[in-house]
Amino acid sequence: MSKTGSTAFPLRLLCLDIDGTLLDTAHQLPPENRAAVRFAADRGICICLLSARPPQAIAPIAHALGVPGPVASFGGALIEQGDKRIFDRRLPVDTARTVIDLARKQDISLSLYRDTAWCVEREDGWSLRESAITGLRPTALPLVQALAEGAPHKLLCMGEAAQIDRFDRTLQQRMPEAELLRSKDEYLEIMPRQAGKAEALLTMCQYLGIAPAQAMAIGDHDIDCALLRAAGVGVAMGNGSDAARKAADWIAPDNDHAGVAAAVYHWIGEGDK
């Protein structure tokens, strides 16, 4: 962590993870974080919400922030600004079909996401938990049938941490065309290659005509590591995983103590704390 509270280039882009970062452990948006994000936006910094969530689960948070900006959902596989689609990459159908088959054999809770669709074979404790977090309800139908309607943006595997560890190892040997990343100890995200959060940051930099050195990113888990390394300033939350903390330039307070606000004021300006 060699960087201090200043950068060689003025910051122009702020990429924010949502769960475990912008939101507290009750999945609420602290008013301090809202004020800090608006403070950054008022200084001409583009705000990009960058999450493994689907777009309709990001929209209420973007609305609560009250600042316009692009949204990168599914961990970066889909990037939109208003009605404009900036980036769109899907998992190969054959890859998704293989995961569906293996998940069924290993009793993994599997969700398929495509645009605004969230599909599960059947609702279970894991999907109900995710519903409570995102405010969404899945459609229950055979996932092979859901797959026939189009390639997914991502698959989400949920289970106990040790079970997901084993499933992760199984997939690592068979999924060279997919990105396998942990967003929680119990969650394994399966996304297309070259469509992760770091690639989303670089796509946004190209879209805005700025250098990656002019971007700041804040995250909390393994899925954010490449993002934190790609940004000019990478900030890990105090509640972050060991991998995220090692990837960061600076460690913020945890998400129950407005760590995002602390990072914004440290790197962008003091503002009204």
Image (cartoon, rainbow, N blue to C red):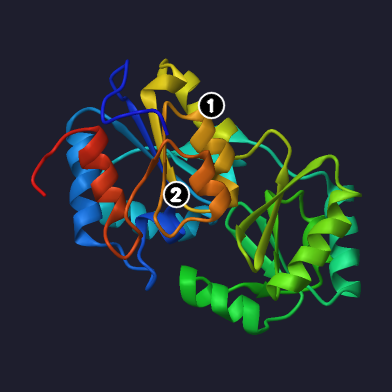
Q: Amino acid at mark 2?
A: Asp
Q: Which residue is mark 2?
A: 17
Measuring 56% from the left and 78% from the top, which residue is drawn there? 129
Whether residue 52 is visible here, answered yes or no, is no
Which residue reaches farthest left? 272
Tell me which corner region of the image, top left, top right, bottom left or bottom right, holds residue 43: top left
Tell me which corner region of the image, top left, top right, bottom left or bottom right, holds residue 82: top left
Label 1 Cα neighbours within 10 Å, binned few <14 / some 14-19 / many ≥20: some
Residue 36 point in image, percent of width and height: 21, 46
Q: Viewed as shown, does residue 66 lie left or right of 114?
A: left
Measuring 32% from the left and 16% from the top, which residue is drawn there? 9
Q: Which mark is residue 203?
A: 1
Say which of 255 and 17 sits in front.
255
* Picture layout, residue 103 above or below residue 260: below
Q: Which secondary structure, mark 2? A: loop
Q: Viewed as shown, does residue 166 lie left or right of 215?
A: right
Which residue reaches farthest bottom? 125
First in residue order: circle 1 vs circle 2: 2
